[in-house]
Image (cartoon, grey):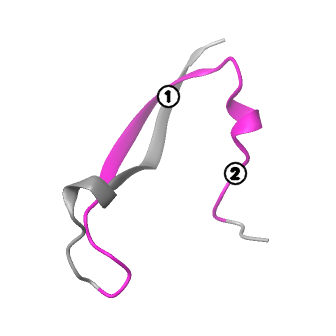
Amino acid sequence: MRHDRMSCKVFKETLLLAKVTTVKKTANNTERPPDLQYSVVQEILKKLHP
């Protein structure tokens, strides 16, 4: 089990302000084509609701 990931269930019906970054490189440091880039939550800044 990876300890750096959380189930999305903990965020159900919750509004958060978060810092998001785009992953543009692969694990071996080569550029990803735009269609294969994806976003990850870098940091949760604030819980807005509830």
| N-terminal label among 1 and 2 | 2
Across and down, in percent, residue 26 comes to 33, 76
**Residue 48 drawn above or below residue 42:** above
Q: CA distance from mark 1 to mark 2?
A: 17 Å
Tell me which residue sits at (25%, 64%) in the image.
24
Question: Quadrant location of residue 28?
Answer: bottom left
Q: Secondary structure at mark 2?
A: loop
Q: Is residue 13 left or right of residue 26?
A: right
Q: Secondary structure at mark 1?
A: strand
Disc 1 residue type (three-letter) = Lys
Tell me which residue sits at (20%, 74%) in the image.
31
Disc 2 residue type (three-letter) = Met
Tell me which residue sits at (38%, 81%) in the image.
27
**Residue 48 drawn above or below residue 24:** above
Q: Is residue 3 left or right of residue 21?
A: right
Q: Is residue 48 left or right of residue 50?
A: left
**Residue 29 drawn above or below residue 5:** below
**43 and 36: which is toward the camera:** 36
Counting other residues with Cα less than 10 Å from the Cα at mark 1, is it few (<14), some (14-19), or many (20 or more)?
few
- Residue 38 is labelled as none
**27 and 15: which is toward the camera:** 27
The magenta stretch spans which residues?
4-28
Across and down, in percent, residue 43 comes to 45, 47
- Residue 6 is labelled as 2
Q: Farthest residue toward the right? A: 1
Q: Which residue is mark 1?
A: 46
Q: Is residue 28 left or right of residue 1?
A: left
Across and down, in percent, residue 50 comes to 66, 11
**Residue 23 colored magenta?**
yes
Counting other residues with Cα less than 10 Å from the Cα at mark 2, is it few (<14), some (14-19), or many (20 or more)?
few
**Residue 8 drawn above or below residue 32:** above
